Amino acid sequence: MIPQFKVCCPAGYHVEDVFDDNLDLNIVLDTGEVFFATVFTVRNVQALLARSPEPYFWSVDMFIVDNLRVATILNAVASIVQEGLTDTIFGRIGTTDTMYEGLGYSFAHLPEHLQ
């Protein structure tokens, strides 16, 4: 069975240019597992490469999309979860109990996507 998920932005959903930016995400599954990832746009990776003294770009727990519109991010995360790649692409950082300790949050109590 494919778990349900919610996508939260630890620092809030603040994107200046949906085609050239990146965003840190927490992906919370209804199993209680919490994962971390950074989503980059293609143009943002190109810009970071152009500014870097190194001939490469890398980041752990990352995936790349064309734009950072909410629908695009949710579609990408849904595909990753449905394909069973959650543990491969995202980094496991805890559970709803450990991440939201003392706040009383469960999956059902978390805000909806990308607020």
Image: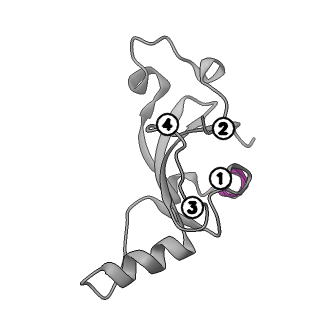
Assess whether mark 2 and mark 1 are in contact (beta carbons under 8 angstroms): yes
Q: Comparing marks 1 and 3, which lies closer to the viewer?
A: 3
- Identify the residue under disc 1: 77
Q: CA distance from mark 3 to mark 4?
A: 27 Å
- Residue 75 in the magenta stretch? The answer is yes
- Residue 49 in the magenta stretch? The answer is no
Q: Residue at x 66, y 51 (%)?
A: 81
- Identify the residue under disc 3: 17
Looking at the rendered structure, the kind of residue marked 4 is Val
Q: Residue 108: percent from the left, percent from the top?
A: 66, 20
- Helix, strand or loop at label 2? It is strand
The mark found on residue 65 in the picture is: none
Magenta stretch: dominant secondary structure: helix
Looking at the rendered structure, the kind of residue marked 3 is Asp
Q: Residue at x 24, y 84 (%)?
A: 53
The mark found on residue 34 in the picture is: 4
Q: Earlier in the sequence, mark 4 or mark 2?
A: 2
In front: 113, or 85? 113
Looking at the rendered structure, the kind of residue marked 1 is Val
Q: CA distance from mark 1 to mark 2?
A: 9 Å
- Identify the residue under disc 2: 5
Mark 1: give few (<14), some (14-19) or many (20+) Cα within 10 Å: many
Q: Residue 72: percent from the left, percent from the top?
A: 71, 57
